[in-house]
Image (spheres, grey):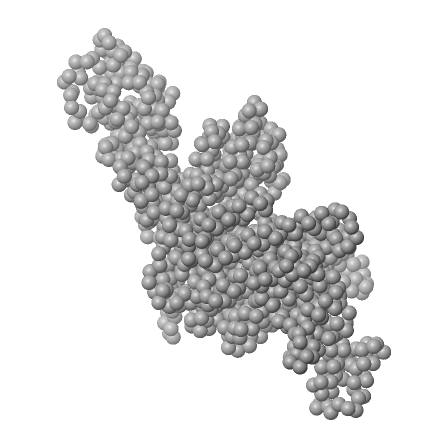
Amino acid sequence: MAASSSSTPNVFRLREESRVELKRIMNSFDGRKDLVIDPKLMQQLDRIANVTFLKKECEVDKIFKLDPLQKAIVGCAKRLYLVRPKISNMKCIADQILLEKSYKEERKYRIVMVPRKLYLCEMILEQEGVFGYCEIDEFHLDLVAVDSDIMSMEIPDYFRSFFLDGELSWMHTVASAIQNIQKLMGLIPNRYAIGRGAKMCFELLKRLEGNRLVEPDYSKSEIGHLILFDRDIDYVTPLCTQVTYEGLLDDIFGITCVLIHGFVEFDINISGKEQGAKVLLSSKDVLYDDIRNRHFTNVFDLLKTKAKELQTLSDKRHGLSSVTEMKDFVANDLKNLKQEKQNLSYHIGACERIIEMKAKADFEEYIQTEHSLIEGSSLRSCMNYIEDTINKQEQLIGTLRLMCLLSLTQDGVPARDYRNIKTWFLHSHGFEHMLTFYNMKKLGLFKEQTPVFQSTKPLPKMATGIDPLAGNSNFKALRKRLNLVPSEDVDLKNPVDMSYVFSGAYSPLSCKLIEQCISREGLEEVTKSLIGGDRDTCTAEVQLKTVRVGKGQVRSGPAPAKVVLVYFLGGCTYSEIIALRFLGKKTGYTFLIATTAIINGQSLLKSIVERPLCPNYNLP
Amino acid sequence: MWKKFRCFQFAMDEEDDYWGSSNVKKNRATVNVFDEKVVFEAASDLDKLRKNLKTPGEEEVECVNWDDTPVITRPSIQQKALQTSVKVSDSSLDPFRGPTVLPTAPERQKSSLNWSDEPSIDSIVKENDPRPPAPARKLTKHEEEINFLCSELEKAKKTVHSKLPVKETVTRMITGLPYSLEQYRSKEEKLELLDRAIETHDGNAIIAAVLFLKRTVTDKIFNAEFAIRPDAINQYLSYLRAHFQQTELENMLGLLNRSEEMAMVKYKQAASIVDAVAKTGKLKSCLDAHFKCDSQLEHDASMIQQQLDLLQIQRPIDSADEMEQTSRKPGIFMTHPRVVSIVNQSVLTTLYYCSFYHHQDPENTYASPLFIRKQHQLNDKQYQWSVIRAQARLKKWDEINSLLQVKGWFGGIKLKTSIGFDNVADILHKHFAPMKEILKFLMLMDDADKRLVLAKKLKCHEAIIETYKAQKDRRSLETYANSLKVQSQEWFYAKDALKSSTIKWKT
C-alpha cells in the first residue's frame, strides 16, 4: 500500500491472527481436553472463535466457566484453563487441582494465561504447591476488532487499576498490542503520547522494540500516526449524556461488545419476540451504518423514510406481471426485504424506548444542567438541580455524573459546597459512599477547590502515588482556548462541527486535542493547552513530516499515510468515536480507534463506586 | 579451565533445571551430560583414545581440558564456577538453544584449544589423560562454529565473575525470557534492579523486583528504599490488596504515612459487616483510631458518628416493627407489609420508612421522622422530599397539605415548600393523586412559563387554561382548545374561558 494512501487498513486481520494462534495453542496440548474459561474472557473469545471452532478444530470436549465456588470439575483426562492472569483465578485453579489430586484423579493440566503470564501468578501456583502439576502457557490476545474502525482490548479494569491504583501490569499489553499492529500494518512513523500513562506506554514500546539496526522503512506503513491518549486528560466527555444514536443505544441498552461486532440486546417489547433478541450492530448493516453517527433528532425522520421505501418495495409484488419478474423478485428482493424490515422494526422500537425513557427521567432538565455546567453559566440553578437529584434518591450514577461535571468544569468545588454535597449524598445513598468520594477525589473527578498558591508548589507524589493534578486540565481555560463550546448553533442534520455529537453544546475535548495534534503534526499546541505539570506528561516522535504543498511546489519525499490510530488508555465512548469519524471525513484522514474498553459515563463511574451493603429501600 | 568449560556445556544442555546441575558429581561421565548424538561421538572418540593410550586410572579422570590437561578437581571452586557460569549460559546464550546451533561435544572441546592460558599444563599431562586432541581435519570442518563459540566464550569468560548486567536481566524480564535474580546479592545491585525495572513501566517486572528485594533484605532496608519509589509502592500495594494481605497492607500504609488511605481501608472493612452489632463495634474503634485524630478527616469522622447514631436507632425500630408485623395485628403492617430490614439503609431511606410507618409517633421516640431530622440535622429540603414522597405513597394528600402549611403574618394560613411546588406536583402526579390536588400545587408555582411546561407534561388541562387566562393570551388558548378532544370536559372549560367577557385579552 502506498504510503500516502488513506484507505482504511483492514483490522479484521488481527482476528484471523488470533484465531490461528488460539488453534496452535489449543492443539499443542495434544488430544481431547476440557476447557475452563475465565468469564471475563468470554466476550473477547467470542469474537475470535465459537464453540464449533473450539470443538472441531481444537479438540475441546466440554467447556466450563471458571467459578470459584466450584471446587472440582468432573471431566476428561486433560484440562486447559484459559484465564486472565489474576491472583484470584490462580487460587481458584490451585484449589481445584489440589482437590482433584486428593481424589486421586489422574489428569493433565495446562494453564493458558491471556494475554501473558505474570510473575505473581506463577508465584501463587508455586506457593500453593501445584506448580509441578500444571504446564503454563500464554496466549497473546490483546486487541480484537469490534468493527471496521474499532479495536478493543476488553479490559474495563484498566481504568480503575491504572488511574486509581497506579497499577502498571497492563501497560505491557498495550505496548505489545501496538507492536502487533506494526507487525501487520508496518511501522508507524509519527507517534504521540498524551498523558502520564500514555508516555509510560510509549517508553515501554520503544524499549520493547529495541534499537533499530537499520533505518526503518516507512514505505509500507499503512498507518501514519499513532496517538496514545490517557483517559484522565479528558473526563468531561465520557460523563456527558450521549445523544447520537449509537451513543444512546449504549447508554440505555448497553452495547455489549460480544461476538464480532457490537450486539445490543433488546427486550420483549421491542423485539416482539418471546425472549428478546440480540441484534447485531455493525457497519455491515447498511441501515445501522447510516443512522449510528447521527444526532438522535435526525434518526426518526430517516427511519420514517426508510419505512416508506421498504413499503414501496414490498408493494412491488402486487405489480408483478410475468413469471420472470416474479422469480426475480423472490430471488433478490424478498429475502433482503424481510431482513431489512426486521432491522427497521428493531431500530424503531429502540427509538421509541429511548424517547419513553428520556421523557420519564426529566431528561430535558438534566441535559440543560449538563450544558450549563459545560458552558459555565447559571451555576446556582445547576447547584439546585444537583441538590434536588440527590434528595430524590434516584439515579445514583446520574447524580454522580453531574457532580463530577460540576467539579471538573469549575476546576474543583468550593469547600463549603463540597462539604454540603457530600453530606447530602451520604444521607441519601448511604454513608458507605464515603469510599466513593475518596476514589473520586483521588482521581480528581470530584474535589475541593484548592487555593491557587497551593497548586504551584510541587505536590508530594509519594503521598498518593498519582499526582492529584495530573490529567485535570484547567477546563475553564481550555474551553476558551480550544473553543469547546461553539458560539453558533450547529445544524444537527447537516453538521459542520463535531460538537453535533453533543447537540452542538460541546466539542469533545479529547477529539479537539487529537485534531490539534494531527493538524500540527506535533504536540506544541496540546502541551500549551494542558496547563501545569502536564507538560512533562506528553511526548512525541515525528519521523515523517507531511510536506505542506504550497502553490506551484512539488511534493517531495514520502509522506505519512493519512491514517491515524488513536489508542485510548482507560476507555473511550461511542460519542468520541463518532466525533473522530466526523473529523476524519472533514480532514481527509481515516481514524482507527483502539481502546482498552468501550465505556460510557455509567460504566466509568460504576467502576469506581464502592457498593454499599444494600440497594436503596423500596416500599411495597 | 576445562572444568569451567564443561560446566558451561552442562548448563547449556540442562538449561531448564540448571540449579539441579550444580549437584552433578565431578566424576560423572561427561558423555552422560550430552544428548544422544553427542554421546555417540564422544564415546567413539573415547574408544579411539583408549586404544592409543593405555594408562591406568583413566576411567576416573574424565574431566579434562582439550589440550590434554586434566583439571584438578577442586570441588569448592568448581561449585562456584558452576554457579556463575550456569547463570551466564542461561541468560546470554539463548541462540544456542536450538539443535541446529548447538555444537556437538568434540567441537566444543576443540574450542577450548584456544584457551592457552591454562595454568598448569605440565602437571596435568602427568595425570594420564584418556582423551587425545581431536583430529586436525575436524578442526577445519567446524571452523566457523569454533570461531563463533570462541567469541561467545570470550563473552562468557568476561561474565563468569561479573554476572549478567542488571540491564540485560530487566530486558529479559519484559520480553518474557527466563531470568534469574538470585545472582544479585549486593544491595546496590538489588536497588539497581528495582530502579531499572521501574524504568520499564512494566508492572510485572516491577513487582518481581520488589518481591525479590522484600525477600532478600531486612525489613528496615526494604522499607527505607521502597518508600522513595512511588511506582514500586503502587505496584506492591495493589499486590497486597489483590492477595488480601490486610495486615501487611496496613503496615505499609502506616509506614508510608498515608493516614487517609489507611483510614479508608479500615472503614471499608468495618462498613462491609452486615450484622449491626458487630458493625457498630468495628465502626467505633475505626472512628477512634483513624478518623478522630486526623483534622483532615474531620468531616468524615462526623459522618461516621452519624452512621453510628443511625444504626443505634435502626436496630430497635426494625425489631419492634418486625414483631408488629409477625403478630398480624391489623394496621399498616398488614396493608403495606415490610419487604426488607431497615438496618443499614441510608438516612433518607430511614426517614422515608419512618414517615411511612411511624408518621404519628411522638417526637421523642426513635421512629419519629422529626427525631431523625433532628439527629441528622437534615435541612427542610431533605426532610420534605422524603416525607412528601412517603405520604404521597400512602395517598394521604391532607397530610401533605398540613405539612406544607405555615402561618402567615396576620394569622392566615398558606402553603410553602422548600423543594418547589413543581416538585410537589410532580411527586403527586407520580403517585396518581387526584387532579385537583395537582392543580392546586401547579397554580402555586410562581413562574407561569414553567407551570405551562409542567402542566402539559402532567396533562393538567385546567392549569394550562387558567394560566393562559391569567396571561390573557387568547391566541394560545384558542390553539390549545382546538387541540383538545371535542366535547370533553376540558374542551368545554377552555371554550368557556374563551367566551368569558371579563378577561381583557392581550392577543
Asked whether residue A373 is in view, the answer is yes
Percent x, y for residue A363?
A: 63, 67
> For the N terminus of chain B, which image quadrant?
top left
Task: Report which quarter residue B58 is drawn in.
Answer: top left
Percent x, y for residue A362?
A: 64, 67
Task: Report which quarter residue A347 is drawn in.
Answer: bottom right
Q: Residue at x 72, y 67 (%)?
A: B399
In the picture provided, is B150 more to the left or to the right than A422? left
The image shows residue A406, relative to residue B191, as above or below, that is below
Q: Residue at x 60, y 72 (%)?
A: A493
Q: Nearer the viewer, residue A554 or A519?
A: A519
Q: Nearer the viewer, residue A245 or B484?
A: B484
Identity of the residue furthest to the left in this view: B122
Q: Residue at x 20, y 21 (%)?
A: B67
Percent x, y for residue B369?
A: 65, 61
Q: Residue at x 77, y 52 (%)?
A: B334
> For the C terminus of chain B, which image quadrant?
bottom right
The image shows residue A298, relative to residue A24, as above or below, that is below
Percent x, y for residue A258?
A: 60, 50
